[in-house]
Amino acid sequence: MNDGVILSNVAVVDPAAVSPSITVIVEVLVACETCDQLEAVKHIFSMEPAIQQCYYVTGGADFVLVINVPTMADFEAFTRRLFFGKNGVKRFRSLVAMDRVKVSLSVPALEETD
């Protein structure tokens, strides 16, 4: 019986084992934070295959993205397509991962209290 706890069963694949890959973490600041604009950006980001994870966050950025691309040229094309002059993105900052120290999708089990 699935009561909504398990969302899906997945395999965590090492991107380097499948093809050359660069992981980039990107902080995105949107130009306008209206509800409609935020929902539009969420939709665009959720449909993009290169984006592995997308978080709507507090602080200095509005979104944090984890992106996997084969090359830096592919990342540049990605930024031109999604960030430059459209989709409501005001500014973005990129961090290129040098090593995958820990990658996990597990959620720690919470202990029930009586």
Image (cartoon, helix red, strand yellow):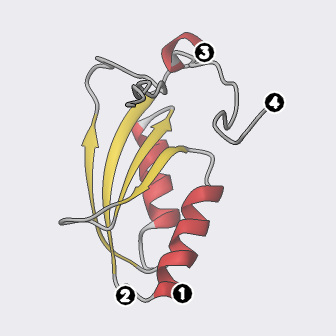
Disc 2 secondary structure class: loop
Residue type indicated by callout 2: Cys
Q: CA distance from mark 1 to mark 3?
A: 38 Å
Instruction: Specify whether 41 is left or right of 63.
Output: right
- Give whichever of discs 2 and 4 has the lower sequence position: 4
C-beta proximity under 8 Å, tags 1 and 2: no
Q: Position of residue 47 (x, y in %)?
A: 65, 57
Residue type at the position of mark 3: Val
Q: CA distance from mark 2 to mark 4?
A: 43 Å
Foreground disc of the pair 1, 3:
1
Q: Is residue 11 left or right of residue 29?
A: right
Q: Secondary structure at mark 1?
A: helix
Q: For the residue marked with disc 4, what is the amino acid?
A: Met
- Foreground disc of the pair 3, 4: 4
What's the mark number on residue 1?
Answer: 4
Q: Nearer the viewer's eye, disc 1 or disc 2?
A: 1
**Distance between the Cα atoms at labels 1 and 2?**
9 Å
Dot placed on the residue nearer the N-terminal end, 3 or 4: 4
| For marks 2 and 3 on the same chain, the one whose residue lies earlier in the sequence | 3
The residue pinned by badge 1 equals: 36
Q: Is residue 70 left or right of residue 83?
A: right
Q: Which residue is drawn at the image coordinates 40% and 39% (left, top)?
A: 72
Residue in view at x 42 percent, y 52 percent = 76
- From the image, tell me which residue sits under label 3: 18
Question: What is the secondary structure assignment of the residue under circle 3?
Answer: helix
